[in-house]
Image (tube, helix red, strand yellow):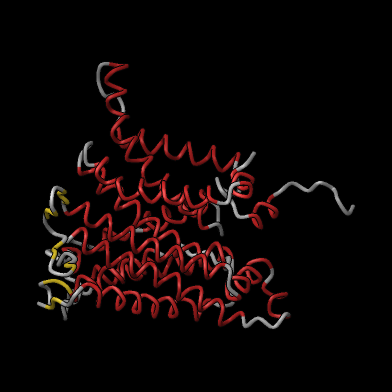
Amino acid sequence: MGIADIIRKHPHAKWIGIALIAVALIGLPFALVQAGTAWVRITNLAILFVLLSLGLNIVVGFAGLLDLGYIAFYAVGAYVYALLAGPHFNIHWPWWAILPMGAAVACFFGVILGAPTLKLRGDYLAIVTLGFGEIVRIFMNNLSEPFNLTNGPKGLATIDPVNFFGVSFGNTSTFGPLVFNEAMKYYYLLLAILMVVIVVNLRLQDSRIGRAWEAIREDEIAARAMGINTTRMKLLAFAMGASFGGIAGGLFSSIQGFISPESFILNESVMVLAMVVLGGMGNIWGVILGAILLSFVPEILRYTVEPVQRMVFGRSIIDPEVIRMLLFGLAMVVIMLFRPAGLWPSAVRKRELAPDDGVGK
């Protein structure tokens, strides 16, 4: 009996399951902090990657537009936050005003990228978006002269933390018997924003816009013949995806307190795309699963590879970073060989990749 059958037979089981998940998510940082605050910070970064993956899933998974420069929107949101909430220009606007502003600026850049690439698909679109991502990074690396906008490769430091009704997220706070360090406070903020983003994604997927994106992904010519304005829909996909990237970038700035162009290299774009592909393009829950796995597995390997070598050989033979990436890459290859549609693919994509059963021949 599957989960769907259990829910159909016992309608209350769905709400009991949701309540248990909510309790687990609320209590998670208190359990993680027992193993060290580092694991709460890793969880926060994992949530940021989930936000990025959900944004990229709109472009790649829903609309079928391969984007290799997605990290550029993350960078735009991060720099907007750092410039408007830091000492570089001595501007200290509140976070709730800057986050939407960063999303709007990233959205604008999404349209800038999308407009000239409307007729491109596949490899050609991937090359153009890859170039866009690198151009943004190079600009941020060099916009320090003659007017110092980004402080070049030195980056921007001492960025303001989030301040929520007088409670600063940059230090530890006590509420009765409960102690919340900065990582734990950011965890709850990120979780709240993630819930909103998931709801927006679900509503988009079930809307006419979501169905139009799916039609464009399946067959753009047929979609145009059916009266869908493909130009508007593709621009909307770029704009929506970029907006989520801008929000994630602003949060990243606030959490880290320091950003530089090296935080937004091509590897980050590839990692986010791998999360979407591994989880299952077009399926929101699959993308979340992929982002969580690819965020935590490398960190778990970081803490286990060296101790295992010392236990087996008595010393560290291979650089832990090398063997960690080797195992990580090997796992990705194996999964893609046996689950080409991803770990949790959408029903449509699963049908597309299903072997031909000869029906209709």
Q: List x then y, in percent, for residue 129.
A: 46, 68
The quadrant where residue 347 appears: bottom right
Tell how many labels: 0
Comparing 56 with 186, the one in front is: 186
Q: Residue furthest right?
A: 361
Residue 73 position by quadrant = bottom left
Which x, y percent locates residue 227?
69, 83
Give left or right: position of 317 versus 63: left
Q: Is 334 situated above or below 134?
A: above
- In the image, residue 267 sits, relative to residue 196, either above or below, namely above
Does residue 272 appear left or right of residue 39 in this picture?
right
Instruction: From this view, report whether residue 57 is shown above or below residue 208.
Output: above
Residue found at x 42% / y 39% = 328
At x 14% / y 67%, what residue is drawn?
160
The residue at 21%/37% (across/down) is 34
Question: Could you tell whether 356 is left or right of 201 in the image?
Answer: right
- Please indicate whether residue 292 sits to the left or right of residue 167 in the image: right
Residue 263, x across and y down, in percent: 27, 58
Q: Judge by depth and name the residue closer to the eye, 4 or 298.
A: 4
The quadrant of the rendering that contains the N terminus is: top right
- Note whether residue 212 is visible: yes
Determine if residue 120 is in view: no
Look at 48% across and 65% down and name the residue there: 67
